[in-house]
Image: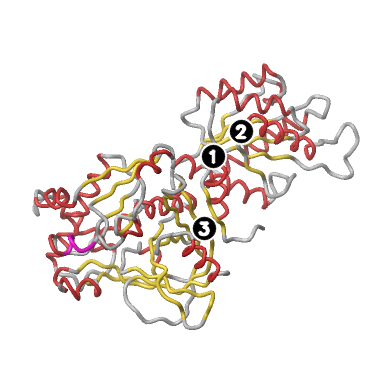
């Protein structure tokens, strides 16, 4: 993720506590954020004392600066070098009309500096700030420790997590996904409600496969852009066993889909990948989808729209590609191990070694000649996060679950894209999935972002998210 985030900084002050701490605290916080490559917008020392907020007039000044940058600010950090004025802080956020994540930070006192000239009382002030924010209906996040020096590694991790939260909330504003074709008839599991998604600000653009096929027919094989696409596919993975005619079809499909994505400002797609594609066009689209997902355009198979939404959120949280997989098989008698699999469109980012081949399951019915384009490889050993969202028509809400596990090196001989994953409480998770009507698909990302996702979706989007990660 190359896009630079912008944070609004509020420095709280109460002047009968040592206010020189505000000058030091503001400078230190700005320095830390800039080292994280975050742009900071705040009051200057020329506008209020030490650039802090204490009075109603200070709140108006700070809010006005935030309003002027409302289309740029992705989150707000409140730092309390001393007790701070809780009312002025809440007023600032309310007057700014910003609807972004807010992180509350308080500086620690030192036992040998508790005299009148040196005590902060930020520990107490933070409680008062939070109390006022709740009264004002303002949602906020907290640091891991109630008070913490900003240079502490724990706080630096808190900042990284908060950045992830800001990316998710920013990315979900007015987001659009593309649905190409219809779901497989048998797969009622991937049905979803466009109206529920729209209620949460998530729009769907649709196009029929026949329109995609017609557009591919109009792409000339002499087009320099097509030749470039062919080269990119060959560079992406080992295509030595793939007929040239199939690679040309892939290149045309990729060219047409990417053009449609760009024209409609889409953040990802879900595609009808079988069997019309193979019967009428003559390839499996897995390799094209793998390429797109690897390029941070998440692409889900079987028109799984809430699957691509889950891919996108994991990608926002980590900055890395996501993959859609099946909860597919038990692994021997290991209660906490599962085989995850797809046939496959996994991004090559996930795989130790990879190649393109024909899709063996589809080939049984459609023929090998119409089944080239699947990405084969084993998922590399790594920590991973999984996430699944779905629309619940009975409640009119989006619900989901998330957790973390480890991709292992346990022996497994199969095809497609696959891996063995060890997940604590796996049997409990499978029971939860079955009893709550979730899909057989889940989404994985090679990161540790479940905490970020839960904070973002529960607190700031109001989604019902079950977390299978134990609190720290």
Residue identified by numbered label 3: 402
Q: Earlier in the sequence, mark 2 or mark 3?
A: 2
- Crowdedness of circle 1 by 10 Å Cα count: few (<14), some, many (20+)? some
- Segment tinted magenta in the rendering: 274-278
Q: Is residue 399 above or below residue 58?
A: below
Residue identified by numbered label 1: 38
- Crowdedness of circle 3 by 10 Å Cα count: few (<14), some, many (20+)? many
Q: Is residue 352 above or below residue 312?
A: below
Give whichever of 186, 34 is nearer the camera: 186
- Helix, strand or loop status at disc 1: loop
- The chief SS type of the magenta part is helix
Give whichever of 188, 77 is nearer the camera: 188
Residue identified by numbered label 2: 138
- State the residue at coordinates (18%, 52%): 209
Residue 254, percent across and down? 22, 54
Horizontal side of 387 relative to 94 (left or right) equals left
Q: Earlier in the sequence, mark 1 or mark 3?
A: 1
Does the residue at mark 1 contact the one at mark 2 (Cβ under 8 Å)?
Answer: no
- Nearer the observer: mark 1 or 2; the answer is 2
Q: Earlier in the sequence, mark 1 or mark 2?
A: 1
* Figure quadrant of the C terminus: bottom right
Residue 215, percent across and down? 13, 48
Q: Which mark is residue 129?
A: none
Residue 436, percent across and down? 48, 59
- Helix, strand or loop status at disc 3: strand
- State the residue at coordinates (44%, 82%): 411
Q: How many discs appear?
A: 3
313 within the magenta span: no
Whole-Å distance between the Cαs marked 1 and 2?
23 Å
């Amino acid at each position: 993720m190359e896009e630079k985030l912008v944070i609004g900084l509020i420095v709280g002050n109460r002047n009968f506590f040592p206010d020189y701490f505000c000058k030091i605290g503001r400078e230190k916080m700005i320095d830390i954020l800039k080292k994280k490559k975050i742009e900071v917008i705040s009051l200057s020392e020329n506008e209020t004392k030490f650039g802090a907020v204490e009075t109603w007039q200070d709140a108006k000044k700070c809010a006005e600066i935030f309003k002027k940058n409302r289309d740029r600010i992705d989150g707000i950090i409140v730092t309390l070098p001393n007790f701070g004025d809780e009312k002025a802080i809440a007023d600032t956020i309310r007057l700014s009309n910003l609807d972004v994540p807010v992180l509350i930070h308080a500086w620690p006192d030192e036992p040998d500096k508790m005299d009148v000239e040196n005590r902060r009382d930020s520990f107490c002030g933070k409680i008062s700030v939070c109390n006022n924010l709740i009264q004002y209906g303002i949602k906020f996040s907290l640091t891991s420790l109630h008070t913490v020096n900003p240079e502490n590694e724990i706080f630096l991790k808190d900042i990284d997590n908060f950045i992830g939260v800001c990316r998710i909330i920013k990315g979900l504003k007015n987001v659009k996904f593309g649905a190409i074709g219809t779901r497989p008839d048998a797969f009622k599991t991937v049905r979803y409600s466009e109206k529920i998604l729209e209620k949460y600000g998530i729009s769907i653009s649709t196009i029929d496969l026949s329109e995609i096929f017609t557009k591919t027919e109009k792409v000339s094989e002499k087009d320099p852009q097509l030749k470039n696409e062919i080269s990119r596919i060959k560079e992406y993975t080992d295509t030595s066993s793939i007929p040239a005619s199939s690679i040309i079809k892939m290149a045309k499909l990729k060219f047409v889909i990417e053009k449609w994505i760009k024209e409609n400002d889409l953040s990802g797609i879900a595609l009808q990948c079988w069997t019309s594609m193979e019967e009428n066009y003559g390839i499996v689209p897995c390799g094209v989808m793998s390429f797109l997902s690897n390029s941070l355009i998440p692409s889900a198979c079987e028109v799984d729209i809430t699957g691509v939404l889950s891919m996108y959120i994991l990608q926002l949280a980590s900055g890395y590609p996501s993959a859609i997989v099946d909860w597919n098989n038990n692994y021997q008698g290991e209660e906490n191990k599962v085989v995850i699999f797809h046939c496959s469109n996994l991004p090559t980012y996930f795989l130790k070694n990879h190649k393109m081949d024909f899709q063996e399951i589809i080939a049984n019915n459609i023929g090998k000649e119409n089944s080239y384009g699947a990405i084969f490889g084993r998922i590399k050993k790594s920590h991973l996060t999984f996430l699944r969202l779905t629309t619940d028509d009975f409640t009119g809400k989006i619900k989901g679950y998330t957790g973390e596990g480890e991709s292992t090196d346990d022996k497994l001989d199969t095809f497609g894209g696959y891996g063995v994953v060890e997940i604590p409480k796996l049997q409990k998770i499978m029971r939860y999935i079955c009893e709550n009507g979730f899909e057989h698909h889940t989404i994985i990302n090679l990161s540790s972002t479940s905490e970020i996702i839960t904070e973002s979706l529960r607190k700031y989007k109001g989604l019902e998210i079950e977390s299978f990660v134990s609190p720290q």
